[in-house]
Amino acid sequence: GVPAAVWGVTAELSVRMDAAAARIGPGQSGIGTALSGNALAPGDVAAVLAEPVMANCGMILPDPGFHDALRALTHAAGTLLILDETHTLSTGPGGYSRAHGLEPDIFVVGKAIAGGVPAAVWGVTAALSDRMDAAAARIGPGQSGIGTTLSGNALALAAMRAMLSEVMTNAAYDRMLTGAQKLVEDLRGMIAVRALPWSVVQVGARVELILAERPPKNAAEMRETLDHALLSALHLWLINRGVLIAPFHTMMLVSPMTEDAAIDRLVAAVDGFAGALEGLEA
């Protein structure tokens, strides 16, 4: 069974989390609401886990000053800031955090660090490392509860070493970012010529075509732009012309091996799709 002490800690945490949630209120997800104006007492929230750029529902860029405010507010609340760079590692060496000078307490990366092989790495600040060492000393020896079947096996380590030494080089990032910039400029040029109510979002080597005139600012706005029938038609159109992009929404990732000719072919195919739509609407 579960020791009584564990039940006690769990119950205490549940009460504190319920109290914090009540103070925040349903549907209030802004950092200003959650962490300022005495909405939360210090210690109510152990950590904020965030992507530097929201990416699972389509790429949503942070507003200017968002990350500075998030860092200041988490500091003030005594809350750890964890940034998940799995989707933004392609921003550049060191990911989005290094490129934009972010200072999380904990930095985590998933399978991108191993070229798609299931793996994960994490790092912490020196100050947090000291606190973790002190906590480990108080607890004493024993099992950590962290297995290594997926996170520490030989295949994952070999894949990570190959990525870090052969793939994630400055030269590779330069090629990726140059190609991504070309893709962005060409797509925006096509959109301008056809006067389409579309837009393009870029985060490093990741590029996304948004079927809305203004890039969404949150997930609710992004969902409103998702015309699933139109997206399915676009993907099918591209596949039938020998072009394959990420199967979810319209994200494109430029690799170190992507040639200009491939970018030209992709843009031409999207342009052809837009032309076909205009023909249907005429």
Image (tube, helix red, strand yellow):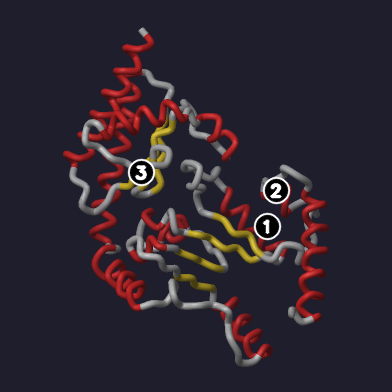
In this rendering, is residue 76 above or below 129? above
Q: Is tag 2's residue or tag 3's residue first in the polypeptide sequence?
A: 2
Q: Residues within 10 Å of mark 2 (few under 14, many from 20)?
A: some
Q: Could you say whether the residue bearing mark 2 is in a helix, strand or loop?
A: helix
Residue 170 as seen in the image, left or right of residue 2: left
Q: Callout 1, which amino acid?
A: Leu
Viewer-proximal residue among 231 and 23:
231
Above or below, 229 relative to 203: above
**Which residue, given by chain and number where applicable, does mark 2 sit on?**
32
List the residue tagged with mark 1. Answer: 73
Q: Residue at x 77, y 61 (%)?
A: 17
**Up-down relation of residue 232 to residue 50 (above or below):** above
Amino acid identity at mark 2: Gly
Residue contact at pointers 1 and 2, CB within 8 angstroms: yes
Q: Secondary structure at mark 1?
A: helix
Query: What amino acid is labelled 3 in the image?
Result: Ala
Disc 3 target residue: 246
